[in-house]
Amino acid sequence: MATLSLAALPLTSSFSIVPKGSTPSPFSLSFPTPSSSSKCGGLTIRCVRVGGVEIPNNKRVEFSLQYIHGIGRNRARQILCDLSLENKVTKDLSDDELISLRDEVSKYMIEGDLKRFNRLAIERLKEIRCYRGIRHEMGLPCRGQRTKNNCRTLKGKRVAVAGKKKASR
């Protein structure tokens, strides 16, 4: 049994610590020794990695797949239909189902490849100096939204203009 510091345990004088092999008295405490296996309380902890992303074990596959950048609700459903896989909790998937799921997900452009593709497309727009590219450079919306009152996310915090006061009525 691991050694315990008696100063760390809030024990009264009527309690005593008895090793596992001894006969316990009615007022004795025994502490289980930690095991060296990877099981915690009878549960095996297993991370499922699909497309370079750890997806949650306690959710259904349809929603777990949406943690991957580039896979939304429709694409997750399409993947499940293509594999004819039932939508069960991720930790209940067998190894064969996981392998087929990984193969199916790898067919799509996801994560780093998708981010790189989008970044290069925006760089190309900036390079050819088209309207959308200029709006990206200036940090303004490029899909026709009005900018007089809104678009604070892109424009940033309001900046006070010196010398401009509200007109009194």
Image (cartoon, grey):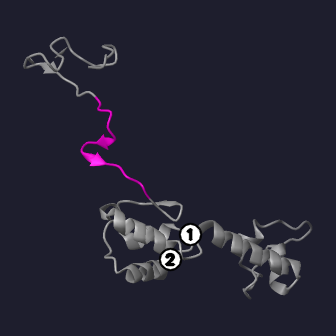
Vertical arrangement, residue 44 with respect to residue 101, above or below: above
Q: Amino acid at mark 2?
A: Gly
Main secondary structure type of the part rendered in magenta: loop
Q: Amino acid at mark 1?
A: His
| Residue 118 position in % (x across, y down) | 70, 75
Label 1: few (<14), some or many (≥20) within 10 Å?
Answer: some
> Viewed as shown, does residue 70 lie left or right of 42?
right
Q: Furthest residue to the top?
A: 13
Label 2: few (<14), some or many (≥20) within 10 Å?
Answer: some
> Viewed as shown, does residue 94 lie left or right of 119?
left
Kindly report the distance in space between the C-alpha atoms of the residues bearing marks 1 and 2.
8 Å
Quarter holding the C terminus? Answer: bottom right
- Give the extent of the magenta segment: 34-48
| Residue 143 position in % (x across, y down) | 72, 86
Q: Which residue is mark 1?
A: 69
Q: Which residue is mark 2?
A: 72
Residue at x 86%, y 71% (from the top left corner): 165
Residue at x 75%, y 78% (from the top left corner): 121
Q: Which SS class for mark 1?
A: loop
> Viewed as shown, does residue 141 lie left or right of 50?
right
Towards the viewer: 10 or 93? 93
Towards the viewer: 129 or 163? 129
